[in-house]
Amino acid sequence: MSQTQASIGDALAATVPMVRTLNLEFDEITAERAVLRLPDQPDFHNHVGGPHAGAMFTLAESASGAIVLAAFGDQLSRAVPLAVRAEIGYKKLAKGPVTATAELGRPAADVIAELDAGERPEFPVRISITREDGAETGEMFIWWTLRPNA
């Protein structure tokens, strides 16, 4: 695990209680991709024995937050990243551990250029949720903004 990845993972675990509650694991965090895993935990199962939809939503949202921090962490002195809206689709039954892989939907440089121009940029993050066999069980889009500091 890289120093940046460890720092972002530690920061999320320290500031977002649900990350600790769900025991999320950080497999990869770069400015291009974030991969987080939700271990199979009976305390967070739904009525069919898989991870609860709320746990999968939190996993995916946390993966999106990790990539946003990796891509825009150097902008935190002048802007606050905020989730604006989210959409999730559950495609297949999830069983066992699940993994969320997040990718930015726009080049980070374009987002920073808008911030430099005095705008409040918005950008999507796509997250794929998969089972251990690789089947995609869900897909989430979260739109983020970088709100300039006053």
Image (cartoon, helix red, strand yellow):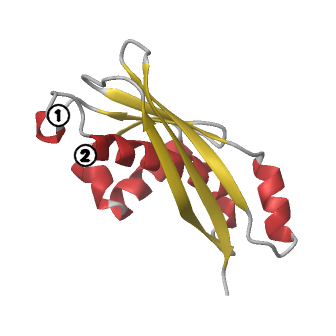
Q: Identify whether 82 is placed above or below 127.
A: below
Residue 121 in picture, x, y percent from top left: 74, 64
Residue 123 in picture, x, y percent from top left: 69, 54
Which residue is label 1 attached to?
A: 41
Which residue is label 2 attached to?
A: 22
Looking at the rendered structure, the number of numbered marks drawn on it comes to 2
Q: Residue at x 44, y 15 (%)?
A: 134
The amino acid type found where label 1 is placed reads Gln
| Neighbours of disc 1 within 10 Å: few (<14), some (14-19), many (20+) | some
Q: Residue at x 29, y 26 (%)?
A: 97
Q: Give 108 or 126, whichever is nearer the viewer.
A: 126
Q: Identify whether 94 is placed above or below 67.
A: above
Between discs 1 and 2, the one toward the N terminus? 2
57 left or right, relative to 85: left
- Name the element at disc 2: loop
> Which corner quadrant of the image does residue 117 belong to?
bottom right
| Neighbours of disc 2 within 10 Å: few (<14), some (14-19), many (20+) | some
Q: Tell me if label 1 and label 2 are in contact, CB under 8 Å.
A: yes
Q: Residue at x 43, y 58 (%)?
A: 11
14 left or right, relative to 115: left
Q: Identify whether 125 is placed above or below 1.
A: below
Q: CA distance from mark 1 to mark 2?
A: 8 Å
Q: Give 135 or 107, whichever is nearer the viewer.
A: 135
